[in-house]
Image (cartoon, helix red, strand yellow):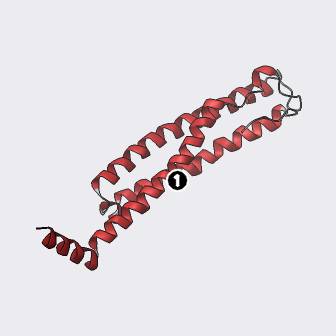
Amino acid sequence: MRFDHNETYASALKKIERRHELTTWIGAAYAGYVALLATAPGARLPPLVSAVILTLLIAGAGLLAYARVNFAYYVTVLSREIDAGRLAPQSPLAAPHAEWPQPAEKAYRATLLLIVVIGALLVLGAWQAAIECTWPTRALLKLYAHCAA
C-alpha cells in the first residue's frame, strides 16, 4: 500500500489505523490454525507436515507481532504530532511522513502469504492421512508389497 500524492495526515492516519486493526483478524486466523493443529484433525497429520506447519505458525506469529507493533507505532507518532498541534490533520503529508511504513507492510503481506501456505499444507496433510487410512489404499499397498517381494 502507498499513500496518494494528495494524502493528508488525517487520511494517512486512518489508513495505518485500518491496517493495524486488520492484524487482529490475521491473528484470529493463526489462532484457528493452532486450534486445528492441536485437535483430532491435526493429530492425524503426518509428523513432518505438523512440524512444518508449527514452524510456519511461529514464524507467522512473529511477523504479525512485528507488523502490528510497527503500525501501532506509526499511529502513535502521527496522533501525538497532530494532538500537539505540530501537524494539521488536513495538511498534505510532508517528506518525512510521506512514505508508507514498508517494513511493517512487508511483514503484514508475509503473514497473509503464510496463512495461505499453512492452509494448503493442512488440507494436503489431511487428504494424505485420509487416503492412507482408506480400505482400497491399504489393500493396494498390501498387493504392491506382495508383488514386489
Q: Where does label 1 land, which residue?
A: 116
Q: What amino acid is labelled 1 in the image?
A: Val
Vertical side of 81 occupied by 68: above or below: below
Q: Residue at x 64, y 34 (%)?
A: 71
Q: Residue at x 30, y 63 (%)?
A: 44
Q: Quadrant of residue 56?
A: top left
Q: Residue at x 30, y 61 (%)?
A: 43
Vertical side of 12 occupied by 131: above or below: below
- Comparing 92 with 119, the one in front is 119
Vertical side of 16 occupied by 84: above or below: above
Q: Is 129 positioned to the left or the right of 86 in the image?
A: left
Q: x%, y% of residue 7? A: 84, 34
- Residue at the left extreme of this rendering: 149
Q: x%, y% of residue 68? A: 58, 38
Quadrant position of the C terminus in the picture = bottom left
Q: Residue at x 19, y 71 (%)?
A: 144
Quadrant position of the N terminus in the picture = top right
